[in-house]
């Protein structure tokens, strides 16, 4: 009798999981990726990789570092947000894309891809052709949205409970474009914004509540400048606003900030309402971007964190302390929150885990990063100390 009850309970649980998944799968359209699941302990880790700019000059070292990052962080999903491996021909691009994707494929890590301003700008191939390269790997969960929306690589990645099959979290992926007709940086287009608005509302109706989420794209939203403090005085760690003369911006004292700026944020010139739609819907906790290679910061504005991640590539003897990757951790029991941290290559190669894994394997690469990174870090630390001492202004917040 007890055995029969256990069997019936197991069958009922399976039915709940299957039906829960099918409810949302049935409502989902062609722009929803296959579902991912929280781990049994309720965790879910994203490794945000962006602006790898793979080429003959850096591919071997960059891919090696990324492979080590995967082995160290053990992510459940890779988010690749553009400027990945653009070359003069599709064949060359394929070579470097294959090298990168083989890291994830061999480790069985799902990958979500979208594109940046450089991924197809030379006109030798299309974004759709590049997406096909990534989607030739079984680990890719990426979607070519075809003619449905502007660009290529706007879609939704749902994350379900490992136990109940209930939809718990959403990951919105946007192709933020390359350039507009006036050669400014582009931004997420009106039809993509409307798709998000309708899809978000549909999911809330079906689930009976808001499903919290994160958004990922290449180019930062224009509202970044609304979240900063405007000043007419140029100074240290104060940056000119792109496309505007005599406007400079820095962290606002009263805002919730983390990380630091190393260059001007570069959003599109025109604003098509993406951030406003997300603020209105109230389900997006943060928008993660790349594009601005040495910026690793976050600013909370209207309830949403606007977050930039470092370029995830090896760049010779430069930027050992300003290039790296971002980790984002979710907890199924608290889906209204997330945790994130930045890992710079200098700190990464000095960590105990990496030393034990790879010191003998490529000591020259790590020695170079340590050597130049030491001086870069010292220069940054001194600069921050001096500026904060004499201005009383905070220019570096905890990551």
Image (tube, rainbow, N blue to C red):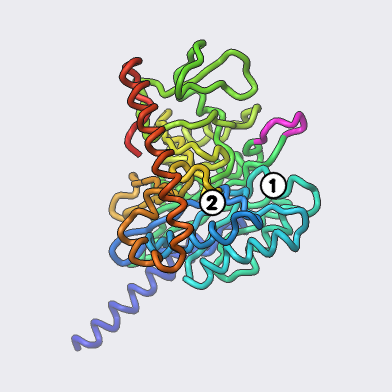
Asked whether 185 falls inside the magenta stretch, the response is yes
Compared across the picture, whether 43 is left or right of 159 comes to: left
> Which residue corresponds to mark 2?
313
> Which of the 4 image quadrants contains residue 186?
top right
Residue 247 seen by the camera: yes
Residue 367 placement (x, y as % from top left)? 43, 55
Q: CB under 8 Å between callouts 2 and 1?
A: no
Kindly state the secondary structure of the residue where label 1 is placed. loop
- Between 168 and 53, the residue placed more toward the observer is 53
The span picked out in magenta is: 180-186
**Residue named by callout 1:** 151
Mark 2 Cα-neighbour bin, 10 Å: few <14, some 14–19, many ≥20: many
The residue closer to the viewer here, 118 or 14, is 118
- At a point 65% along the width and 22% down the height, the residue shown is 243
Q: Residue shown at 80%/52% (left/top)?
A: 124
Q: Choose mark 2 or mark 1, whichever is in front.
A: 2
Q: Circle 2 — which element?
A: loop
* Lower sequence index among marks 2 and 1: 1
Q: Residue 331's quadrant in the figure?
A: bottom left
* Dot label at residue 213: none
287 drawn magenta: no
The residue shown at (37%, 74%) is: 14
Tell me residue 253's x, y (percent).
Answer: 35, 20
In the picture, measured across the screen, residue 131 lies left or right of residue 22, that is: right
The location of residue 77, given as percent across then percent down, is 46, 60
Q: Position of residue 380 (x, y in %)?
A: 40, 33
Distance, label 2 to label 1, CA atoms, is 25 Å
Predominant secondary structure, magenta span: loop
**Which residue extends farthest left?**
2
């Amino acid at each position: 009798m007890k055995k029969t009850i256990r069997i019936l309970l197991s069958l009922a649980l399976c039915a709940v999981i299957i039906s829960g998944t099918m409810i949302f799968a049935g409502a989902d359209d062609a722009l929803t990726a296959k579902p991912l699941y929280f781990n049994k302990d309720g965790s879910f880790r994203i490794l945000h990789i962006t602006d790898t700019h793979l080429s003959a000059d850096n591919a071997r070292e960059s891919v090696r570092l990324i492979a080590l990052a995967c082995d160290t962080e053990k992510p459940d999903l890779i988010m690749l947000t553009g400027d990945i491996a653009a070359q003069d021909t599709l064949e060359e691009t394929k070579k470097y894309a294959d090298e990168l994707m083989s890291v994830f494929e061999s480790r069985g890590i799902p990958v979500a891809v979208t594109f940046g301003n450089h991924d197809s700008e030379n006109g030798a191939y299309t974004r759709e052709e590049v997406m096909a390269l990534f989607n030739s790997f079984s680990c890719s969960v990426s979607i070519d949205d075809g003619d449905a929306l502007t660009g290529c690589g706007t879609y939704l990645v749902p994350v379900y409970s490992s136990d109940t099959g209930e939809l718990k979290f959403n990951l919105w992926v946007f192709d933020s474009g390359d350039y507009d007709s006036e050669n400014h940086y582009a931004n997420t287009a009106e039809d993509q914004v409307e798709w998000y608005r309708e899809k978000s509302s549909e999911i809330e109706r079906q689930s009976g509540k808001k499903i919290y989420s994160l958004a990922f794209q290449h180019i930062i939203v224009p509202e970044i400048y609304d979240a900063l403090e405007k000043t007419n005085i140029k100074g240290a760690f104060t940056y000119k606003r792109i496309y505007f003369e005599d406007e400079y911006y820095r962290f606002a004292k009263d805002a919730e900030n983390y990380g630091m700026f190393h260059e001007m944020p570069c959003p599109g010139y025109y604003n098509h309402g993406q951030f406003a739609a997300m603020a209105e819907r109230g389900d997006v906790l943060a928008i993660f971007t790349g594009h601005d290679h040495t910026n690793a910061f976050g600013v909370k504005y209207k309830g949403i964190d606007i977050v930039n991640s470092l370029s995830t590539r090896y760049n010779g003897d430069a930027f050992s302390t300003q290039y790296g990757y971002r980790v984002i951790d979710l907890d199924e029991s608290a889906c209204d929150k997330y945790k994130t941290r930045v890992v710079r290559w200098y700190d990464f190669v000095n960590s105990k885990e990496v030393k034990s894994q790879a010191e003998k394997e490529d000591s020259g690469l790590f020695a170079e990063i340590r050597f130049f990174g030491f001086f870069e870090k010292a220069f940054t630390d001194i600069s921050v100390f001096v500026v904060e001492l004499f201005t009383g202004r905070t220019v570096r917040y905890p990551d």
